[in-house]
Image (cartoon, helix red, strand yellow):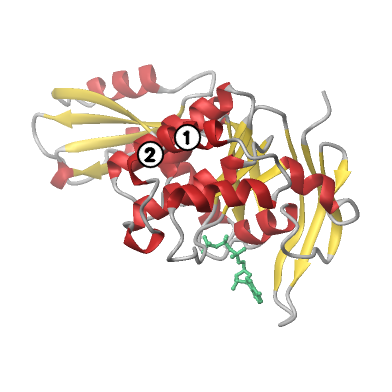
Amino acid sequence: MAPIVSIQNLTKSYASGFQALKGVSLDIEEGEILALLGPNGAGKTTMISIICGIVMPSGGRVTVAGHDVVKDFRATREIIGLVPQELTLDAFETVFNTVAFSRGLHGKKPDPAMIERILRDLSLWDKKDTMLRQLSGGMRRRVLIAKALSYEPKVLFLDEPTAGVDVALRKDMWQLVERLRASGVTIILTTHYIEEAEEIADRIGVINKGEILLVEEKAALMQKLGRKTLTVELAEPVAVVPETLAPFNLRIGSEGRTLIYDYETSGERTGITGLLSAIAQEGFRLKDVSTQQSTLEDIFVELVGEAK
Ligand SMILES: Nc1ncnc2c1ncn2[C@@H]1O[C@H](COP(=O)(O)OP(=O)(O)OP(=O)(O)O)[C@@H](O)[C@H]1O
């Protein structure tokens, strides 16, 4: 199946001369949830803004459902919904009217029942007659999402949907994203929260300094780059690692009370058997042995660190 969003060699230099995107290529499949992870200034918002037709690219091409986002922006705007990081909402307008108006703005026929459903889904129904200026920050963010959903986009971009919101709202958002996916909406979200990508994404893209460093299925990513550490707790502390254990590149932890071994989970041989028998031959008495799996956070920090 053709990708719903296709990004080919996209570049963007701002008027200041700053190159925010340096040739990004990425295909997004219909119905998937893609999380874009990257540090501040990586180019995430720039990329989303180009796809949504808000920022002009300097080079390359983006198509959405086969339509070019520059040449055919009317068609692509009908398909795309954007929930920006923040937006100045009309402070004196009510929640219901704001959301209904957003639907009209996108050329869709009024559908009060649908607006009601969206507001109920986002726990905003009891606030439907409240003026926006009276809402909390988290509620306003829900309104931004309701606005984007009001015109039934096929592809939804969420730019840091849960930045600065409380845990309960974050969980609500995740559930909402899951429901949207179930209804066939393709979702692209940017986030600083690795936990968020880990929780809801099918695929994860890592972007840094205007370049995509990697795009992978979440599960494959965890496995491919996954490392584990084995911690051996000793009955008596050691000061140095004995010569015979040198090939294992052990680290000493907890003031000599532990030996720490890093190994690849994907490798055919982990080296654990050899290590444990070498430790036994050295005459160490073991108190405990434990292993720890590396997290997506470790992977991310390593990738972004390497690219520096
Ligand atoms: N209008 C502009 N003019 C000049 N430079 C800009 C402009 N907009 C963004 N930039 C620069 O482009 C780079 C990428 O910004 P962008 O907002 O795309 O990053 P981001 O990954 O979304 O970051 P964050 O996580 O902080 O939102 C930054 O260095 C930013 O300062």
**Taking 88 as reference, is 54 left or right?**
right
In this orientation, which residue lies closer to the viewer: 284 or 168? 168
Q: Amino acid at mark 1?
A: Glu
In this orientation, which residue lies closer to the viewer: 192 or 237? 192
Q: For the residues labelled 2 and 1, say whether their Cβ atoms are less than 8 Å apart.
A: yes
Residue at mark 1: 116
**Taking 249 as reference, is 56 left or right?**
right
Q: Seen from this angle, which residue lies furthest bottom?
A: 16
Q: Report the image quarter containing ligand 1.
A: bottom right
Residue at mark 2: 125
- Element marked by disc 2: helix
Distance between mark 2 and mark 1 Cα atoms: 7 Å
Q: Is residue 54 above or below residue 218?
A: below
- The image shows a total of numbered marks equal to 2
Q: Residue at x 80, y 56 (%)?
A: 10
Q: Amino acid at mark 2?
A: Trp
Q: Is residue 69 above or below residue 175?
A: below
Q: In x, y percent, where is residue 90?
A: 49, 65
**Label 2 packing within 10 angstroms: few (<14), some (14-19), many (20+):** some
**Label 1 packing within 10 angstroms: few (<14), some (14-19), many (20+):** some
Q: Is residue 282 visible?
A: yes
Q: In x, y percent, where is residue 6?
A: 80, 41
**Taking 23 as reference, is 273 left or right?**
left
